[in-house]
Amino acid sequence: MLARVFSSAVIGVDGLPVRVEVDLARGLPSFSTVGLAEGAVREAKDRVRAAVRNCGYAFPAARITVNLAPAAVKKEGAGYDLPIALGILAASGCLPLESLRDAWFIGELSLDGAVRPVRGVLPMVLAARQNRIRRFFVPADNRLEAAVVREVEVVPVARLEEVVQILNGLQEPEVASLDLDQVFASCRDGSADFSEVRGQEYARRALEVAAAGGHNILLCGVPGTGKTMMARRLATILPDLTFEEAIETTKVYSTTGLLVPERPLVVERPFRAPHHTISDAGLIGGGQVPRPGEVSLAHNGVLFLDEFPEFRRHVLEVLRQPLEDGCVTIARAATTLRFPASFMLVAAMNPCPCGYLGDPVRTCRCTDLQVQRYRSRLSGPLLDRIDMHVEVPPVQLDAIRGSGPAESSEAIRERVNRARRIQKSRFAGLDRIHCNAHMGSTLTEQHCRLDGAASSLLDQACRRLALSARAYYRILKIARTIADLDGADRIDPVHLGEAIQYRRMQHGDNND
């Protein structure tokens, strides 16, 4: 007898329908799984057999063949345990075949029949909604994550026999629900705030401009100037995630298994700070079974790379594509996967190997050759893709002993939100363009027109600083953001002059 049960796989960060076909035939008892099944899927036969028997059902002594379609897609993980078990029970007459229609099932089975959680549930439920599926049975521990999608009836189950009782009409299903307003209301914990940063008005202003336009930024300064402290507080002045952005970010965390059960939706801007010993696969993503890397985990948030030149050069060079495209493309012989990677890059570095070049108190002992080699670890094309280059000077003692706290993150975020609302209106109707940093050359020329004085100032800066065409457009985008912060319709020379200041450090003007 043949039974069909529908489940789902995760390819990249997107769900894909999977049809689980179970056939019981006469012959010597056997259990075979076909359909490009990975090791954990092939091992399902032992878990399913034990779970069915320990729940009090008879396991058929027949030739069992399980096919996972489409066969061209690799199936991995233990999430197919539940649909395989239900297919066997339906094929053996314990379940009506009609009860399996219009529903998807996912879950790992323990030997005693308990349904264990799996990762990637949110992309699966989103795929079910796209395919107009009415009901999705998920493990009880994944109930809140699945309930984020309101258009699908999410049925949490804890045991195999509970699913059988529901499908046989002997038990009323429980439907999971989630108050999204309450989830978003509890997003900010206030543990870090810009009011704790004393002094550094120039760097604080640069970070505000970066947050307002979504610009990448490089902070350079001697140790102890507060580069890391300010970078870790950048996420507190970014605009709140929209529901669509929260779904995109949560899909990545759900796929990698990093989603906290108590927080089923990522509602805060991610902040990722990998160590400089990270591999290129860890940063960008990949592996034998490609997984998202740190750049994807920082999607819609901040990727902070401290001690920027200490990262291996080939690791840094792979950042070029995500910085330009906002996504990561990983090609394999069988498939090509795309992971989202639209993030703000915040990098921090010392001016020299010892860190004290330009320090007014401590003496730098590095030779010119050592300084040159240190800086050459960062290639010109990579630096060119970082919009803003900011020198962070040492903090004066008087600033540290200031009488009152500095401006809070909430006050800065209000200005950032006003600027982002202007940009949202400007780019209304454009796909994947949410802020000034995302503009291409055509949009930049359209929205960053200069008058005679501003155009002459930019031409002079390009000649003196030997700026590339990419740097030219990035200055225009930064100037547009500064004008948005001022609420100005056009870019004035004062806006352009400030924007030019954020591109000078790359050319050595501030570090010699």
Image (tube, grey):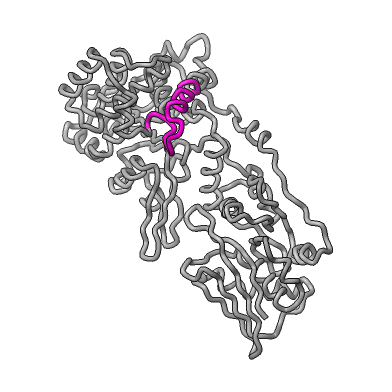
Quadrant in the picture for the C terminus = top left
In the image, farthest residue toward the bottom? 27
Instruction: From the top left corner, tell me how far across and down residue 244 is, in percent.
Output: 54, 39
**Is 106 or 503 nearer to us in this picture?**
106
Range of the magenta residues?
417-437
Q: Residue at x 67, y 72 (%)?
A: 87
Q: Is residue 293 above or below residue 410?
A: below
Q: Position of residue 407 (x, y in %)?
A: 50, 15
Query: 337 or 114, which lies in front?
Result: 337
Q: Is residue 380 magenta?
A: no
Q: Residue at x 67, y 66 (%)?
A: 109
Left or right of residue 414, residue 507 in this image? left
Query: x and y percent of residue 265 in the render?
Result: 60, 42
Nearest the camera: 242 or 160? 242
Q: Is residue 343 above or below residue 2?
A: above
The structure residue drawn at horizontal position 32% and vertical position 23%, both measured from the top left corner, is 448
- The vertical placement of 86 against 389, above or below, is below
Of all residues, the one furthest to the right in this rendering is 170
The N terminus: image quadrant = bottom right
What is the number of callouts on the image?
0
The answer to whether residue 228 of the structure is visible from this angle is no
In the picture, measured across the screen, residue 228 lies left or right of residue 111, that is: left
Residue 51 visible at all: yes
Say if the magenta span includes residue 425. yes
Residue displayed at 33% across by 17% down: 491
User: Which of the 4 image quarters holds residue 477?
Assistant: top left
Instruction: Please state which of residues 224 and 275 is positioned toward the viewer in this rendering.
Output: 275
Q: Provide residue 214's location: percent of width, then percent of height.
A: 41, 30
Q: Quadrant of residue 29?
A: bottom right
